[in-house]
Amino acid sequence: MKDTDIASIIYLSLLAIALTGSIISANRHQIGKVARYAVVWGFLIVGGFVAVGVWPELRNNVLPQQSVVTGTGEITVPRSFDGHYYLTLEINGAPIRFVVDTGATDMVLTPQDAARAGLNTANLRYTSRAMTANGMVQTAPVRLDLVEIGPISDRRVPAVVNGSPMQESLLGMSYLNLFDRIAIENGQMVLTR
């Protein structure tokens, strides 16, 4: 431990003692109530420390991550707690998170994700239309210079930018068809090239 860490611990300990003494002194007529609140706050603080300490272990179970196996060209995408599959692709160097949507024909970018990927959204021409679960929307066809996931890269990938607000970009069949095999096994989607 560094000297500054020890000094910080001493300072915070003295501050806690002074604060505790002040609370007890101001509420000496209700000492039972103060004790109950102190116990509750103590449990909350200890619970917070435990949660922070255990989170790295739980993260892989709560938020499983996609993995790329380079030797076989296999990508494993775990099913999220909401039942969907999410895949993060690098679009022109920017990480973009997609909902895998086998019911979507195209790779559909939100305007925000299109801008993050370096597309000039002010110059897009919304000349196409698409029927969605929310009705008809206008879309702007684009070509993505570079789409990467792990060692797999594709150039000049066709996509569309949605003209209407949407929560997440969709990874439709136009991109998924670039894979030789798509399978859902044991709660995960496996894509193989």
Image: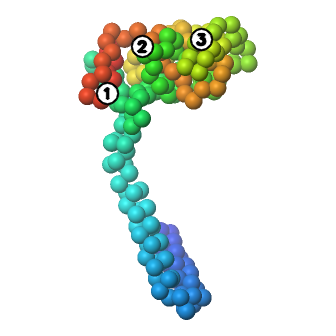
**Residue that label 2 marks:** 176
Q: Residues within 10 Å of mark 3 (few under 14, many from 20)?
A: some
Looking at the figure, which quarter contains the N terminus?
Answer: bottom left
* Vertical order, 30 against 101 (above or below): below
As rendered, which of 144 and 48 lies closer to the eye?
A: 48
Residue 76 in picture, x, y percent from top left? 33, 25
Disc 3 and disc 2: Cα gap in Å?
A: 19 Å
Q: Is residue 42 visible?
A: yes
Return the x and y of residue 138 as percentages of the image width and height: 66, 13
Question: Which residue lies at the image location 49% right of the left edge and 14% below the top edge?
Answer: 104
Q: Which residue is mark 3?
A: 130
Residue type at tag 3:
Ala
Tag nearer the camera, 3 or 2: 3
Q: Are marks 1 and 3 in contact (CB under 8 Å)?
A: no
Per the image, label 2 sits on a secondary structure element best described as helix
Q: Is residue 14 visible?
A: no
Q: Earlier in the sequence, mark 1 or mark 2?
A: 2
Q: Amino acid at mark 1?
A: Gln
Q: Relative to the observer, which residue lies in front, 35 or 15? A: 35
Residue 139 point in image, percent of width and height: 64, 13
Element at label 3? strand
Instruction: Pick out the residue farthest to the right.
Output: 122
**Which circle marks residue 25 in the picture?**
none
Q: Residue at x 27, y 17 (%)?
A: 72
Q: Quadrant of the C terminus?
A: top left
Q: Earlier in the sequence, mark 3 or mark 2?
A: 3
Viewer-closest of 72 and 137: 137
First reached walking from the N terminus: tag 1 or tag 3 = 3
User: Answer yes or no: do the residues labelled 3 and 2 have beta carbons within 8 Å?
Assistant: no
Kind of residue indicated by mark 2? Leu
Which residue bears the numbered disc 1? 188
Q: Secondary structure at mark 1?
A: strand
